[in-house]
Image: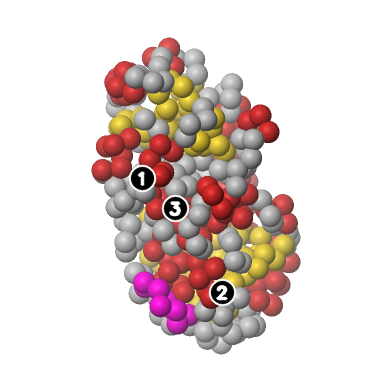
């Protein structure tokens, strides 16, 4: 089990360190050197182990100064984006997984799609109330810029984790590179650019597949172009939100009686399940899942997950009921699917969320001018 290295080696430590490098009074846990302009290239799904295995496809990235961070738990996009957006651990910011129970409602909330059933809505400011690093930068007079596809502008997730940023919509790679170079002309500059197609390819065809390798080549070229256009006094950092594994076994948790008895809601995702028990059934559910998945997954109670520091040194009391009564984390290449309620996810080849090296280890690559 690779419990994330919160406090000096995790993704949550990066945003404060970058602001400190720009001269703000923020904790610099990663000892980032000062710079006048900083660009962060966030590549969805670019695990350090995955990049190392295919260095020949990404020669530019493979040749950069490199250190490894841990993503945080769960190793999934919504959790990591919120850690990047706030500089807080998951236990502090409350975005504790992909699909979480809304306490007292009997409903699951999809934090990525920002959807609830029956037309219900969720206020991003209420679900994630912590100030963002971009708001803190704005208070110091720094205009933070976020360059990403137009489809994500104004979404609930964007509003929850990127409050205070100036969103610059750009879909094509050429446009994203151009917008970054324009934003980096200002001084100081605090720019983030996002690329998500590598993760999409990994989900559908698996990491290491032909399509995934094609996307890795695009990422490598994009990183090189971003670096070549940096003005003097700049630093470019390339990182990711999580890695990935290819599933070699799947268990349909909706069709195994031992995994449905006493379960009210099945949240999280295939590699990091939040299992919410019916009233009075938590112990029964814990025992059943432990026995059924013995030798394949870590199965712990909510209290055990919190006390073991999976979500960080502390979990706010207000967020505790967002965590499943039972937390289930495969350590083999197992995916725990729910085809009836989540049919697309059940068809994936690549998954993430767990605390294996392939999912937790993410690169932090650096270019300076």
Name the residue tied to disc 1.
317
Name the residue tied to disc 2.
138
Q: Measure how far apart labels 2 and 3 are at the Cα level.
A: 20 Å
Question: Secondary structure under badge 2?
Answer: helix
Is residue 183 highlighted in magenta? Answer: no
**Which mark is nearer the camera, 1 or 2?**
1
The residue at 61%/76% (across/down) is 143
The image shows a total of numbered marks equal to 3
Binning the other alpha carbons within 10 Å of mark 3 as few (below 14), some (14 to 19) or many (20 upward) gives many
Q: Which residues are magenta?
A: 20-28
Relative to residue 122, is residue 366 drawn left or right?
A: left
Relative to residue 314, is residue 210 drawn left or right?
A: right
N-term mark: 2 or 3: 3
The residue at 33%/45% (across/down) is 310
Tell me the tag on residue 93.
3
Tell me the tag on residue 151.
none
Binning the other alpha carbons within 10 Å of mark 1 as few (below 14), some (14 to 19) or many (20 upward) gives few
- Magenta stretch prevailing secondary structure: loop
């Amino acid at each position: 089990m690779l419990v994330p290295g919160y406090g000096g080696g995790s993704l949550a430590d990066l945003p404060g360190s970058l602001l400190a490098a720009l001269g703000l009074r923020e904790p610099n846990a990663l000892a980032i050197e000062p710079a006048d302009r900083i660009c962060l290239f966030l590549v969805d799904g670019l695990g350090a182990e995955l990049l190392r295995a295919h260095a020949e496809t990404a020669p530019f990235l493979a040749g950069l100064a490199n250190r490894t961070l841990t993503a945080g738990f769960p190793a999934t996009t919504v959790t990591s984006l919120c850690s990047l957006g706030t500089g807080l651990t998951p236990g502090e910011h409350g975005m504790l997984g992909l699909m979480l129970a809304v306490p007292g409602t009997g409903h699951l909330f999809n934090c990525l799609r920002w959807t609830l059933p029956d037309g219900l809505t969720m206020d991003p400011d209420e679900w994630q109330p912590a100030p963002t690093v971009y708001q803190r930068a704005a208070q110091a007079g720094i205009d933070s810029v976020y360059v990403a596809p137009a489809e994500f502008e104004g979404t609930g997730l964007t509003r929850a984790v990127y409050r205070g940023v100036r969103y610059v919509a750009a879909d094509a790679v050429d446009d994203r590179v151009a917008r970054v170079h324009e934003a980096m002309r200002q001084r100081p500059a605090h720019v983030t650019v996002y690329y998500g197609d590598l993760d999409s390819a990994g989900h559908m065809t698996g990491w290491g597949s032909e399509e995934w390798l094609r996307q890795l080549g695009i990422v490598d070229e994009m990183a090189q172009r971003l670096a070549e256009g940096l003005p003097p006094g700049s630093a470019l950092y390339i990182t990711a939100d999580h890695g990935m594994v290819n599933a070699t076994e799947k268990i349909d948790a909706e069709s195994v009686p031992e995994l449905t008895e006493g379960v009210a809601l099945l949240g999280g995702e295939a590699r990091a399940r939040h299992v919410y028990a019916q009233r009075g059934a938590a112990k029964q559910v814990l025992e059943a899942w432990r026995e059924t998945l013995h030798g394949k997954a870590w199965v712990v109670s909510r209290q055990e997950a919190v006390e073991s520091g999976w979500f960080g040194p502390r979990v706010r009391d207000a967020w505790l009921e967002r965590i499943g009564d039972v937390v289930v984390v495969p350590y083999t290449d197992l995916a725990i699917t729910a085809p009836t309620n989540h049919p697309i996810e059940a068809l994936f080849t690549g998954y993430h969320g767990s605390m294996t090296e392939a999912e937790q280890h993410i690169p932090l690559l650096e270019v300076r001018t």
